[in-house]
Amino acid sequence: MFTVEERDRIRNRLVQMSRTDPRLVAGALVGSTAGGGGDRWSDVDLTFGLADGAAIDDVLADWTVRLANEFHAVHVFDLPHLSTIYRVFVLPNNLQVDLSFTPGNKFLAKGLKYDLLFGNPLERGSDLQWSTCFTPMPALLGGGCGKLSIVSVQRETRLSRSHVFIAA
């Protein structure tokens, strides 16, 4: 099981890697640890804005190889939403890493809690609102609180965490 120190070290390394990738023009910490929140079970949630002309499929492929090589991460699944793709990884220490990639001109959503790491946030139109919902696993299996979700089951506690992004 990962420690908070390991999670922070991995997150910092991912941020360092992102700052050197010329295809990424912006990056932000999102999720439960944004704004100094989170707990010892929190995963790593990072979002990146793509440079004009950067092919999202190429970026996803390259980052998947980099995470596999450096962290022995396993790509679990993707969740496309509008122009964003969320790629979920799990590391051998059970740390979940969620990376999302969005065209730079649509980087960060209105109302999304984030810590900007580099670049500029460009708010999406006012018609898009984001919310987060936490629900126990049985509720998720029965429908939960949204149609799109990324689920992380914490093995030690058998609790689940669901990040649900809903377009209003």
Image (spheres, helix red, strand yellow):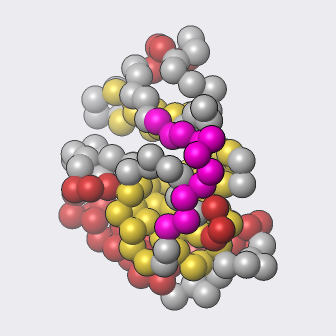
The answer to whether residue 130 is left or right of residue 51 is: left
Residue in front for this viewpoint, 41 or 28: 28
Indicate the quadrant containing the C terminus: top left, top right, bottom left or bottom right.
top right
Dominant secondary structure, magenta = loop
Residue in front for this viewpoint, 126 or 160: 126
Report if residue 44 is visible in the image: no
Quadrant in the rendering for residue 41 = top left
Q: Residue at x 43, y 78 (%)?
A: 118
Residue in front for this viewpoint, 38 or 108: 108
Q: Magenta stretch: residue 113 in it? A: no
Q: Residue at x 48, y 83 (%)?
A: 19
List x then y, in percent, for residue 59.
69, 72
List x then y, in percent, for residue 51.
67, 78
**Does 77 appear above or below 108?**
above
Residue in front for this viewpoint, 121 or 87: 121
The answer to whether residue 38 is left or right of residue 142 is: left
Q: Which residues are magenta?
A: 121-131
List x then y, in percent, for residue 165.
55, 38
Q: Magenta stretch: residue 128 in it? A: yes
